[in-house]
Amino acid sequence: QVQLVDSGGGLVQAGGSLRLSCAASGRTFSRNAMGWFRRAPGKEREFVAVMRWSGGSTYYADSVKDRFTISRDNAKNTVALQMNSLKPEDTAVYYCAASRSYSGSYSDFITERYYYYWGQGTQVTVSS
């Protein structure tokens, strides 16, 4: 059974940092895209960041560019999201996601439908 387990969320003041982690089990994702989405209160889930495959190209939402960094550890089958300079508007439940496909384009990577596997989500709250 494939499982993604998100962790690392919490409460932080504006300007602070958090590091989210996602551990995958049941299969390896070294050739698949893995990324992060988030859902803020009252809003739809939105794309945050993705790495095409371990060590591959990365893409970020404009709202987090230059503040967040996605990384992957192929040996540990994990993906992480380092979040710096956090803002209150970053408050959301963050979800790790992994594709089942080995191919795709930018328009796929930023779309929820492209991802087959999802973590349970971890809450990030940024206070002002």
Image: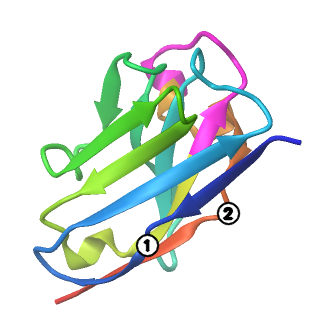
Q: What type is the residue that disc 2 sits on?
A: Gln
Q: Which residue is mark 2?
A: 120
As for residue 89 lying within the magenta part, the answer is no
**Rendered view: 70 above or below 37:** above
Name the outermost residue toward the top: 103
As for residue 102 lying within the magenta part, the answer is yes
Query: What span is in magenta?
Result: 97-108
Contact, mark 2 vs mark 1 (Cβ under 8 Å): no
Q: Quadrant of residue 61?
A: top left
Residue 104: x and y in percent read 56, 13
Residue 80: x and y in percent read 41, 47
Q: Residue at x 64, y 12 (%)?
A: 102
Residue 83: x and y in percent read 25, 58
Q: Quadrant of residue 33?
A: top right
**Rendered view: 100 above or below 19:** above
Q: Residue at x 52, y 27 (%)?
A: 75
Question: What is the quadrant of the C terminus in the image?
Answer: bottom left
Q: Which residue is mark 1?
A: 9
Q: Secondary structure at mark 2?
A: loop
